[in-house]
Amino acid sequence: MEILEKLSENLISGQDKIVEKLVQKALNENISANEILQKGLIKGMDVVGEKFKNNEFYIPEVLIAARAMKAGMTLLKPSLVKTGVKPVGKMVIGTIKGDLHDIGKNLVAMMMEGAGFEIYDLTVDVSPEKFIEKVKETNAKLIGMSALLTTTMVNMKATIDALKENNLREKVKVIIGGAPVTQEFADEIGADAFAPDAASAVEKVKELIK
Ligand code: B1M
């Protein structure tokens, strides 16, 4: 679809205002929010990642692309998040300590909210202590952790260990995700679930709390 290709191209070049206009236009043309997200925004961000890896893009270019991604996601949020759903559970979510990537985590938070979960978003660089503190404060039965860096994804295990130390491991389910995270890694660190994308995160969590 031509409009989604244009959307990807403008995301790659960090044109946030044009990205906003194109997302709005696509919504007006009744293209689903999910299709706009997957085939427009995420597709563009994948190219940004490739260029970054190949040293064709540096941090400033990636940052402006991320800003354009966020502008697009803000417009999609009302369509992704259904309103009026009764809260079905509480989830504490955050990007792991040492990691500042938040786009994927924000998507998961949005989708979970859309599925009726009350979300406590601790944002980025979240220490195990902060996760524990919020779980105690809110009595949430779910923790969601996101990681984009192979160097700091080990910090997910530290949060699971902290749950054990605080006698909370039996009460709180843990789901993890992020580009370098795999089911194998989830099994290795003793997480309850892994999801490769935001939509399946919702499915996995629903299974967990059944
Ligand atoms: Co960074 N970065 N970055 N970066 N960056 C990556 C991750 C990298 C793969 C790029 C590359 O080299 N190809 C690479 C990591 C390499 C590695 O560890 N193996 C990398 C690097 C190296 C770095 C720095 C170290 C660069 C530097 O400083 N030299 C630095 C680290 C800073 C830090 O965190 N301490 C850095 C910085 C940045 C920016 C700040 C410039 C920016 C982040 C802006 C922001 O988030 N606000 C940035 C970006 C944008 C990226 C790429 C290009 C895109 C990430 C993204 O948003 N993708 C990324 C390359 C890539 O991933 N292809 C890259 C879109 C997003 C929707 O996908 O987050 O994977 P993702 O989320 C998915 C799924 O993974 C899943 O759902 C989402 C889809 O529905 N998911 C979950 C995510 N969390 C989940 C949680 C769940 C379940 C599913 O349950 C709770």
Image (cartoon, rainbow, N blue to C red):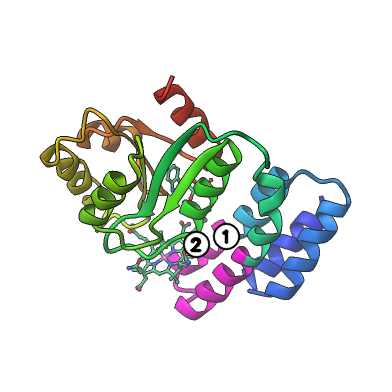
The secondary structure making up most of the magenta span is: helix
- The location of residue 135, given as percent across then percent down, is 30, 45
Q: Residue at x 49, y 62 (%)?
A: 49
Q: Amino acid at mark 2?
A: Gly
The correct choice, above or below, for 69 with respect to 135 in the image is below
Q: Which residue is mark 1?
A: 45
Marks 1 and 2, how far apart at CA: 6 Å
Q: Which residue is mark 2?
A: 49
Query: Of residues 33 and 65, which is closer to you in this image?
Result: 33
* Residue 172 relative to residue 209: left or right: left
Q: Is mark 1 within 8 Å of ligand 1?
A: yes
Q: Which region is colored magenta? A: 46-70
For the residues bearing labels 1 and 2, Cβ distance under 8 angstroms: yes
Q: Secondary structure at mark 2?
A: helix
Query: Of residues 25 and 161, which is closer to you in this image?
Result: 161
Q: Secondary structure at mark 1?
A: helix
- The answer to whether any part of residue 186 appears in the image is yes
Q: Quadrant of residue 170?
A: top left
Local crowd size for mark 1, using a 10 Å CA cut-off: few (<14), some (14–19), many (≥20): many
- The location of residue 16, given as percent across then percent down, is 68, 73
Q: Is mark 2 within 8 Å of ligand 1?
A: yes
